[in-house]
Structures are given as structure tokens and as C-alpha cells.
Image (tube, rainbow, N blue to C red):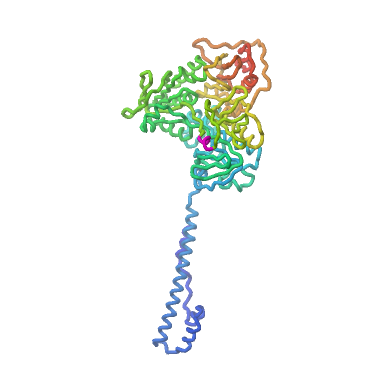
Amino acid sequence: MFRCRGALARALRPPPPRGRAQAGTLLQRWNVPPDLQLSRQVQTGVPGEKGSNKFFAFIVGLTTLGAGAYVYKTLKDNKERFTSRVSSITRPQDDESSAAGAHVKVPSHVPFLLIGGGTAAFAAARSIRARDPGARVLIVSEDPALPYMRPPLSKELWFSDDPNVTETLRFKQWNGKERSIYFQPPSFYVPVQDLPSVENGGVAVLCGKKVVHMDVRGNTVKLSDGTQITYDKCLIATGGTPRNLPAIERAGKDVQKRLTLFRKIEDFRNLEKISREVRSITIIGGGFLGSELACALGRRARTRGLEVIQLFPENGNMGKVLPEYLSNWTTEKVRREGVNVLPNAVVKSVSVSGNRLVIQLKDGRKVETDHIVAAVGLEPNVELAKSAGLEVDSDFGGFRVNAELQARSNIWVAGDAACFYDIKLGRRRVEHHDHAVVSGRLAGENMTGAAKPYWHQSMFWSDLGPNVGYEAIGLVDSSLPTVGVFAKATAKDTPKSATEQSGTGIRSESETEAEASEVHISQSSSPTPQVPKQGEDYGKGVIFYLRDKVVVGIVLWNIFNRMPIARKIIKDGEEHEDLNEVAKLFNIHED
């Protein structure tokens, strides 16, 4: 401020006084033409006479005009300098959003281009830099935020006691340690405009921009604002978009205004705010996301008087994943969290009546509520397939890739949008955090010449609060035959205890790519765990999913840090005569 005032004072200050000039001095400073000088010498009249006065007036007028022009130019120059200085001082500094994409000079060429700003893209960027420390990596993300992890959006963030959690996006893990949902702070990234010139390369993130066209032959992409970028190697990690129900899509704008398709940070912020303002929220969907959100909001039902309803077409929560008996138990667990669970509920229509939403079910039941959360799956983002000429799998969706996650010689795909071939389980598409981490990492390695196949069996997990959780791997489909082996749980058999032991909240961070070297199955003198009888609690256990008598999927129920064993069993692909003995490998009989 003081500098601004000083500049303004200098700009408005008149030029320094020149003193009173004598006629001779004035003529010396002004290059008088020879004919005028001769006139002055001829006309030697007395002062005050007509000829002398005219000449003197002419000289004075000319001098005044020159002095005025000088003052005007000085003031103008000072004003321009002052305006420029004020502008430089008062210009707002780049915040995260402006650094993320607005008014940024985008490089015309990058060696490594990553399309999408989620977990898979970040894992790939880190992998590229690990193998090539000087690599220059540009992430183009439609999301306005820097790369972050999604699982806490439906888990730990809802259990935070911090009233500002929607702004800080920091949370306490089940083990009590605090962390942010962002993978890295802004200082980790290189400014986009500096990426071509910064020493030793780096990772830059161009947020709020979407790649709308891809020229595979020309190695060029076009952004939504018309910007074009050429690349040497490219990763497509575009993720997916939450599905909506046809009945809701037909309902009109009044219903759409009261709908949340939960996926991003803003969805968490909006739903958290809504949960404080309305009397009733209905969650449609009984899968991972729907059940986690139901439990999270159910806890608020007891303290704030919020009605939480969950409805889905299956017989119980997680009905497509868990065997029926365990799905029914999970449903009762969700109900105990304060949720009104309505199974076997198929939505026929949604309308507005008065100030409330009315959900009409196909069996004639009606549900009145104030807000709807649709958690009915994910649609992979494959819009680039058309312009790029890439193949989309007709059965599973997503870009079809080979065992090295390649769609073309210099194009790779990772995360939710990748449909890959599993050498043990066939072609698959997986929508889980651990798969995004591992596939992104492998794609990054292969983009730097590793040429490694994707053999890893990714795991996933879900927590129904800090006391009940499970981890799963392989094909976990309730339509497959299953064998469950259970035992009584102890205080150590909870997600909270598991994170205390491992030191991580995102459990796949400790499990990723680990695999037991050997698995020995032998007779043991320890008691054989059995399936609980009707009415008994499913404390902890192992559920094996079979195809042609071979284990193709495993769910570890309240058993943690044993995923390497499960991964090894699936990779071996052997038949087992007694799965009770296999279950003992997980030490479920230990107290």
C-alpha cells in the first residue's frame, strides 16, 4: 500500500522548476533558424515597439507549448507506470483452481500424457517417475480437484467429529491416525506451464479440462476448450460415471434437483449439508456404496432425528456378493445402525407431491422422502473410443486391452475403464481402489518399457462402520457355489484393530501385490471351524467361491492382513477336498 501511494505521488508531482530563462538563453536552447536569427539582428527597435513585441510573444508562446508537451508526456508516462504497478500488486495470486487449469499456458507436447485424474492416473504417474526420474508427466483431469482417494468419501469422513471436515477433507482412520484424502499436497506438483522447462521433470495436473477427441495416428488429443496436445505415450484412466435409474431420469427436473449420484468430493459435501437440512434421505442400492452410506447416515439418524431409508431389489444387503445367510445378517446389522431397510424393492416411478418426493414401488408400496441417493453402479467412460478407434468390450464395458494393459502400441488403459484379460479368471473389468492402484502402477511401468503382464489379483474391502468389515478377492458372485467357515470373533477382529496393526487406513496400501510364497495345507489338531447355526453371530470367517470345484473368489469376514494367502490360493487354481483345512491357513481359530 505504501508503494502504491508513493508511485501515485510521484506520478502527480509537477516537473521540477526550470528557473526564469533570459531571452538569449532561451534562443540558445532552441535551435533558431538562420533567417529568424538574422531578423533578430536587423530589428533592433526599442522595447515596447510593435515589431519587437510580436517577436517576443512568438518566442514565449512557443516555449510555453514545448513546456506543456513535456509536462503532459511526463504525467502520462508516470500514470502508466503507476497503473502497471498497482495492477501487479493487486492481482490475485493463483489459487488451487487457477493453478489447476484456468488461464494456464498448456504445453503443446508432453512425453507422457495421462487422461483422467483419479487413483489409476496418480499411481501411473508415480510409477513413471520411479522408473524415469526425469520424466515429464501431464495429467489432464475433468475433476477440479487434485488427485485424491475415493473410499473415505463413503467411509471415514462420515465418522469425523470435525465440524469443518467438508472443507479440510481430513479424517481420522479407524486406527486414530489423521490424514488427508489427497494423495499429495499441491507443492508436490509442477505448475503446468513450467513442465517443459523445469529441471528434472515432474508431474503436472491440468484440472477442470476434458479430453474430447483423440487422434491416435497423429498422437494428438483435443481438450474441451480447443487446446491440442501431442504426446509420445498416453494412458487412458477416465474412470466411470454413476448410473441413474430410468425411473428417476423420466421423473423431470423437480426430482433431479433432489437427487445425488455419489462419486466426487462435491457429492460428499453436498450430501453432508443436505443430511443436516432435511428430515428424510432414501438410498437406492444395496451394494458396497449404498450399504456404506446407509450405515454412515444411519448413525446420524439417532442423534439428529434424520430418517434414513435404504431400498434395493435383492433379498438383502450385498445380495449380489455375499451368500444369502451372510447377506441377511448384514441387513440386520444395517438396521441396527438406524436404517429402515426395504429389500425386494423395485422402483417404478418417482414424483413430487407437495414438498416431498414419492417413490412408487412395483409391488404397490410407496416411500415418501426429501432426498434420494442413487448408488446403482458405474458406467465406464469410453467416449474417446469413437474418435480413437479403440475397441469397447460388449459384455463388461470398458476399453479392451491386452495382458500388458495396452490398447495400442503407445496407448494404455487402467482403472475402472480397463477391460483386461485375467489369466486365471478370464476377461474382467474391476471397479475398486486396489485395482486402480495396481493397474495404474503396472501401466506406468509398461509405459517406461517394463513389458510386464497383469497377473495381480486385486482386492477390495468394505466397512460397515469401525467394527464390521470384510476384504475380498477374485470372483465373488453370490450365484456361485460357496463354502463358509466361521469362528467366534475377538476384540482384535475389527477394521479398527486391523488398521492399528497395519498402520494404514486404506488397507490395500499394505496388501497391494503381496502374495504368500507357499501355502501348506495339512491336517491339524486345532478345532475345525464350523458354519454358525441359525441365530448365531458371524464373528469372523472365510467364504470360498467355487467354479468347477476350484476356488475363484474369497471373502475374509472380519479377518484382516491375510490377503496374500488368499491371492496365492486363487493363483494356484487347485481343487481342495476339505476347505475347512484351507480355512485354517487364515488362523481363524486363534483367539
Q: Residue at x 42, y 33 (%)?
A: 273
| Quadrant housing the C terminus | top right
Question: Which sits in the foreground, 458 or 63?
Answer: 458
Query: Quadrant of residue 219 in the image?
Result: top right
388 in the magenta segment: no
Give percent across and percent down for residue 85. Answer: 49, 57
What is the x, y in percent for residue 252? Answer: 36, 31
Query: How many discs appear?
Result: 0
Task: Specify the quadrant of the image occupied by residue 269.
Answer: top left
Q: Residue 137: x and y, percent? A: 60, 41
* Residue nearest the viewer, comparing 56 with 396: 396
Is residue 591 something one can see in this rendering? no
Q: Is most of the magenta stretch helix, strand or loop?
A: helix
- Name the foreground residue: 80 vs 375: 375
Q: Residue 514 in the image: x percent, y percent?
A: 64, 26
365 left or right, relative to 420: left
Tell me if residue 274 comes above or below residue 545 in the rendering.
below
Which residues, given as a range, are shown in magenta?
A: 383-387
Farthest residue to the left: give it: 354
